[in-house]
Amino acid sequence: MRVLLLVIPFILPCAAAAQERAGWYTEGDFAPSQRLEITLVNTLDIDRSDCPIVITREQFPVKKLHEMWVTVVDPSLPSKPEPTKEELAFAGGHGMRAETNGHQIFYQLDDLDKDGIWDELYFQTNLKSREQKQLFIYFGFSGRGWNPHGTHATIGSYCRHIIPWWESANIGWKLWFPSSVDMYGKRKPVLMSERMCIDNLCGYYGVPKANFDYGSDIMGVGSSFGAGGIGVFELPDKQDSVSVPRFTPFKGKKISERNFNEDQITDTRYSFDVVVNGPVRSIIRVRTMNWNTGHGFYECIQDYTAYTNQSYSTCKVTFTSFFPHGNGVSFACGIKANADQGGNIVEPGIAIRTGSEQVADPDDDTGQKSHKVDFVGSALVVKDQYQPAYQRITGLGGNHMFRIPVTKDLTYEYLIAGAWNEGAVYNTPEAFHAYVRKTAREYNHPVQVRCGELEVK
């Protein structure tokens, strides 16, 4: 029998034992005696589904925790009944038993900086317009509760090329080019990046030979920013010029001739890590090093995150080296634009690209026909707090860009989203436009979290 021993200082100086209240959660023989009330506040006049909730270690009154000593419970959800004999046999000893007074929801206690200490408690929930919702976090060891993953992240050798993938069941992304995101759509909600890497399946032509539900690569990136990418605007007198990590000045090499960098010693280099892998969110970390543009030297970290039941990914960019040679430099992020202006929408802090796409392997010499996708949507959202200024550039395949003033801490964030006509959700331009606009509002107004006092039963 496995026994996990952990000592937690539950009695806090600022939180005396509260009087016993009705409605304490139980699950089988798990009857915790300590809990913390959490109030979530939706400040928007719209309903929010699967919205991210982040509670940092600094915000949380209990610091010393193990992930199996935390149970997040929504008292408004119906409790799980006692499992049948068949269900119990399938789930085994870690299968959940009957609950009372609510239902536990999946969460993560994530160590983002990899020092062995958790940094964020993360989960997702639904909130009505202007709703203030009460949840409880219960403390005490519980070894039960399987949690199917709604996201996945992996790093694989894909056609001899090391690349990261991150995905929800709706949509996925990968970095064939290390600084410009590829996007792939699913026909049915499914996680499939692991299988694509293990079997090295071609992502083009709709991959029907592998599994029709897997879908297809749905965007040609080429020299563009694809479904999302970063750069720096270094030349204030040349508004159409942006520096990109994989296009650096080398003699005898035109940008059009260069898909990757020159080498790993003298040119830009990259490394990839899986920071978090589900169940509710997954995070890929990209380190860009030794990036010399000819007008400055830079290094940065990008954290790309996928979210359960969502069709967007967020990216946090942190520059660890930032040495421009001149003044007036600004951060940049962008996505590929549509050649047909009617397929582009630009609003404050938002750029959307929609239209058809002829999806084909650019290196194919077998004569296979391309897979035509009638509607591909991609979008870029930058938070208002970063004061984004739109810039359309014609170079590098044509892109929607945002200029972002350099921040004091050398960080900024943006969001990318995607959809296609063969997908299960947001499969029309109108539905995708509405989803992006709603997501942008939520992204700019995260759910407020209030921690109450610790209660002791």
Image (cartoon, grey):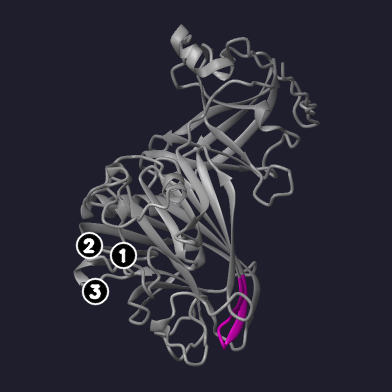
Question: Which residue is painted at 39% across and 34% down in the image?
Answer: 128
Front residue of 366/98: it is: 366
Based on the picture, tell me whether residue 295 belongs to the magenta stretch: yes
Q: Which residue is drawn at 50% across and 12% down?
A: 88
Question: Pointer 2: what residue?
Answer: 368
Q: Earlier in the sequence, mark 1 or mark 2?
A: 1
Front residue of 182/197: it is 197
Report the Cα–Cα distance between label 1 and label 3. Answer: 20 Å
Q: Badge 3 is on which residue?
A: 339
Q: How crowded is mark 2: few (under 14 residues within 10 Å), some or many (20 or more)?
A: few
| Magenta segment boundaries in residue numbering | 289-299
> Could you tell me the amino acid type at mark 3?
Ala
Identity, as a three-letter code, of the amino acid under mark 1: Asp
Per the rendering, the mark at residue 18 is none
**Label 3 SS:** loop
Q: In this view, does 133 lie above or below 287?
A: above
